[in-house]
Amino acid sequence: MLIVSEEVREALAAGRPVVALESTIIAHGLPRPQNLQVALELEESVRREGAVPATVAVLDGRARVGLDKEQVERVASGDGIRKLGHRDLAPALATGASGATTVSATAFLAARAGVRVFATGGLGGVHREWTSTQDESADLALLSRTRIAVVCAGVKSILDVAATLQRLETLGVAVAGYGTDRFPGFYLTDSGHPVDWTLNSPEEVAAVLRAQDLLGGPQSALIVANPVAEEEQLDPRLHARVLDEALRECAERGVTGQAVTPFLLDYLVRHTDGASLRANLAAVRGNVRLAARVAAAWSR
């Protein structure tokens, strides 16, 4: 039920760098036809850095690590493409469903295929009002038991960043800022929270991965928090104002559960005239480039 593309399989066998890419951003994170353009652009960005892209998705009940262009187009434009976390994988495979993989599902399948480096936009985390909703992303627990490096722009700023960092610490997931001692806030260069460790080169990240293996401890992930460039971030004052408005409207409308995140992200796009989407894409592009360089250092 796990199909690794020939290109990815050969690269792994030869010890060449491979970068896993999630497919939720293709199917559910961007408008059409921009989603397909971005998906192909990100794969090409990985190739320019000398690595092999391994976009992950489930098609017709088959988990795939590495898609061809036709399969990427299907994820981007097909009807009935579900959003799959790792808990959804077994039902999707058993029923022949097709879906785009979230961070948790992508990390799980990539690690099963032997891919060590994964690039995404922002992690899920602990939601605001957790004490009453108990709403926490499945990403966190999955990463606590999956040996993979996740290059990301922190966690989505609509979440409770402080609580998410505390939860990652409790779960034993290492977090390092890339070139910074501050934890990024997805759209923002700085979430306002520090990190304990700073790594300054792909080689340093690869050294941490090797140390994880040599220690032989719990199979947990390494979060490489790569901030969006300051000139490409969403204006912090605009972000604070619009997010506050979005949270109030979310509460007034009674939006709960899995509907909260897409509601807030859509609100931010519409009420920042697309500036949040531009910051999102800038972060993803930077993460993909860095992940390819980390994969190259790891393969050496």
Image: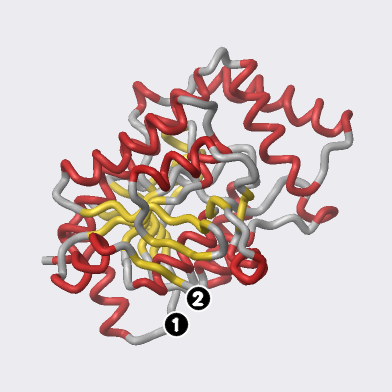
SS at circle 2: loop
Real-space Cα separation, disc 2 to disc 1, in angstroms: 7 Å
From this view, report whether residue 274 is shown above or below residue 186.
above
Does the CB distance between marks 2 and 1 fall below 8 Å? yes
Q: Residue at x 88, y 29 (%)?
A: 252
* Residue indicated by mark 2: 145
Q: Residue flagged by tag 1: what amino acid is it?
A: Pro
- Residue 33 image position (x, y, % from top left): 47, 25
Q: Is residue 107 left or right of residue 99?
A: left
- Residue 16 image position (x, y, % from top left): 15, 64
Q: Residue furthest left?
A: 300
From this view, report whether residue 8 is shown above or below residue 184.
below
Q: Residue flagged by tag 2: what amino acid is it?
A: Arg
From this view, report whether residue 299 is shown above or below residue 145.
above
Q: Is residue 137 left or right of residue 24?
A: right
* Residue indicated by mark 1: 218
Q: Residue at x 45, y 67 (%)?
A: 109
